[in-house]
Amino acid sequence: MFKGALPGFRDFYPQELSERAFIMATWREVARRYAFVEYDGPPLEPLELYTRKSGDEIVGQLYNFVDKGGRDVAMRPEMTPTVARMVAARANALRKPVRWFSMPQLFRYERQQKGRLREHFQLNVDIFGAADVAADAELVACAVDIMRAFGLGSQDVVVRVSDRRILQAYLESLGVPAEAVHGVYGVIDKLERQPAAVSAEKLVALGVPADAIDRIVTIADVAFDELSSRLATTSAAPVVQEFADFLRFVPALLGGDESWLRLDLSIVRGLAYYTGIVFELFDRSGEFRAICGGGRYDTLLQSLGGSELPALGFGMGDVVLGELLRAKGLMRPADTRADYWISAADDVPLDTIMREAARLRAEGQSVEYALRAQSLSKQKKAAQASGAKTFVTLTNDGTNG
RNA sequence: GUGGCUGUAGCUCAAUUGGUUAGAGCACCGGUCUGUGGCACCGGGGGUUGCGGGUUCAAUUCCCGUCAGCCACCCCA
């Protein structure tokens, strides 16, 4: 007797599946509103697709094995390499900008914990071939509209936005040595999770000037105006200007609502392939992990051997989102109750019920009945328990009750 | 991979300082009640107390290991 799923994997009983379906239906609906079209790829990919982008150390976190043909394969841990490959393969034929979304089940061989399993479903929304920040704004607005579609407001969720290029320019303006920037990203990424003193020590070790330490530790609070004036005379000035556009575009796409965005240079998004604006959605209480994260990765397609298409996208998993929706009482799974429950008096043969069921089913109604001869009271009880919307009783003189 | 906490029926929990066939509610199944708002009553199935060892006359209760879960770290989706 097997009991339970493998660690980190979930059984979706009807209750859970209806919740998942609710989440996915909402994702799909909002993506449709933004004119993104759905695609999918293989759940199993060549291992190399991931090692080429992330290095061999990634293998320890993948579900990988050798198949019967001797191929090194891995269950997909993320969708970006797959979609990048798909787009790259037809880069010249696809109408630009490419606006695609997908809801793949992704796998990761890691110890599970709250909000993080070995398997999850993740909405992936990507745009290829759009270099302007309007595309970045479009993505953020889409993510926010998904929150709205679930009934979440800006009092519940905040979008923390940053820009890799601005962060780098800001760090340089503070006198951080170029070779230390990468290490400083690592420290910034952990600012929220470790004591300021520890962060400061690490910065000192990286060779960061003493007068810059405090500014970096409090980098999440830097205001746009301060950045703007500090970087006005540097080579990053155009990027800051673009960012200003971005900060204007997002509210415009949200009907003038400016309450969702918050500039936060501490948002680093891992240390990997992002090249421009990056963002993450968090619940305001800070109780959960990031709900959604994404950004621009203009060089990824090229690094995977494709063409030079600019690209950007975000991912939103079902696990943290589901936890948040349940906590807020906003989980509204679809109604799975049958339309009809047909019962019959003792002397009515089962065939009669079946014929009536067939008639209603042909009309598109969902119909349940006892599947065996039962007393009427028994049937009534079963019907009540099923929650069916309409209870029908057939009598032997042909009338319905 | 590392550390801390936890592990009794599908769910929520009980079981006096270790002591005799491990209990209850809910759920499920069967029956009674020919009219109720998923009512009531009666009855039933279901647990080798996560698993494996050890200590003991005796372990759900103590010890060790293992597996699983939760939390943190690592790392990130």
Image (spheres, rainbow, N blue to C red):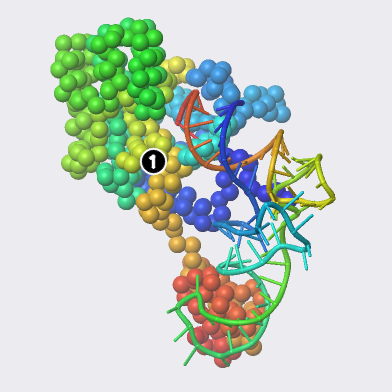
Q: Is residue A70 above or below residue B52?
A: above
Q: Badge 1 sits on which subunit? A: A
Q: Can residue A5 be seen in this view?
A: yes
Q: Can residue A169 be seen in this view?
A: no
Residue at 66% across, 80% down: A373
According to the image, label 1 marks what residue? A287
| Numbered-mark total | 1
Give the x, y percent position of residue A87: 44, 27
Give the x, y percent position of residue B74: 50, 23
Residue at 25% across, 29% down: A263
Per the image, label 1 sits on a secondary structure element best described as loop
Question: Depth check: A102 or A180 in front?
Answer: A180
Q: Is residue B61 above or below residue A140?
A: below
- Label 1 crowd bin: few (<14), some (14–19), many (20+), radius 10 Å: few
Question: Depth check: A269 or B53 in front?
Answer: B53
Question: Depth check: A228 or B72 in front?
Answer: B72
Q: In this view, does A342 lie above or below A6?
A: below
Residue at 54% across, 72% down: A385
Residue at 58% across, 83% down: A377
Q: In this view, does A121 lie above or below B47?
A: above
The image quadrant of residue A358 is bottom right
Q: Is residue A6 left or right of residue A127?
A: right
The image quadrant of residue A125 is top left
Q: In this view, does B26 lie to the left or right of A97?
A: right
Give the x, y percent position of residue A185: 37, 18
Q: What residue type is labelled 1?
A: Glu
Give the x, y percent position of residue B39: 51, 79
